[in-house]
Amino acid sequence: MSHVRPMTEVISAYDQWACTYETVENATRDLAAAVLRHYPLPMHDRDVLETGCGTGLNTTYLAQQSRSVLGPRWLGRHAGAGPRQGRSTPGAVGAV
């Protein structure tokens, strides 16, 4: 018996999950955001590739701290930059 789902089903499930990701309680997500902000990284004059950007929760923060940030869009309409797609000063935020 195969447990492989069609890609359209996976994308649909991701979109449903992503719409609520930032609004439900999630200690792991909140800890990751807190650690990122607590331990400053030297990225002021650097370009950042955010490989695990998901809905883009930390993308705006990274763009404000760096020259630019790119969050690859892997699945669904919410993947990659999510609601934060666009330009953020001083860094550009993008999704591919």
Image (cartoon, rainbow, N blue to C red):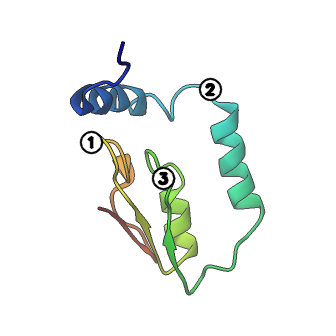
Identify the secondary structure beneath mark 1: loop
Q: Which residue is mark 3?
A: 53
Q: Count every numbered label the image shows and give the total.
A: 3
Q: Which residue is mark 1?
A: 77
Answer left or right for 50 relative to 6: right
Farthest residue toward the front? 1
Mark 2 vs mark 1: which is more N-terminal?
2
Mark 2 to mark 1 CA distance (whole Å) = 22 Å
**Decide: marks 2, 3 in contact (CB < 8 A)?**
no
Farthest residue toward the right? 39
Identify the secondary structure beneath mark 2: loop
Q: Which residue is mark 2?
A: 25
Answer left or right for 52 relative to 83: right
Q: Quadrant of the N terminus?
A: top left
Name the disc covering residue 55, or none.
none
Could you say where residue 51 lies in the image, as x and y percent from the top left?
49, 59
The amino acid at mark 3 is: Cys
Q: Residues within 10 Å of mark 2 (few under 14, many from 20)?
A: few
Could you say where residue 96 lies in the image, as x and y percent from the top left?
29, 61
Name the residue: 35% across, 18% down. Answer: 2
Name the residue: 50% across, 62% down. Answer: 50
**Decide: marks 2, 1 in contact (CB < 8 A)?**
no
Identify the secondary structure beneath mark 3: loop
User: Of the residues tagged 2 and 3, which is closer to the observer?
Assistant: 3
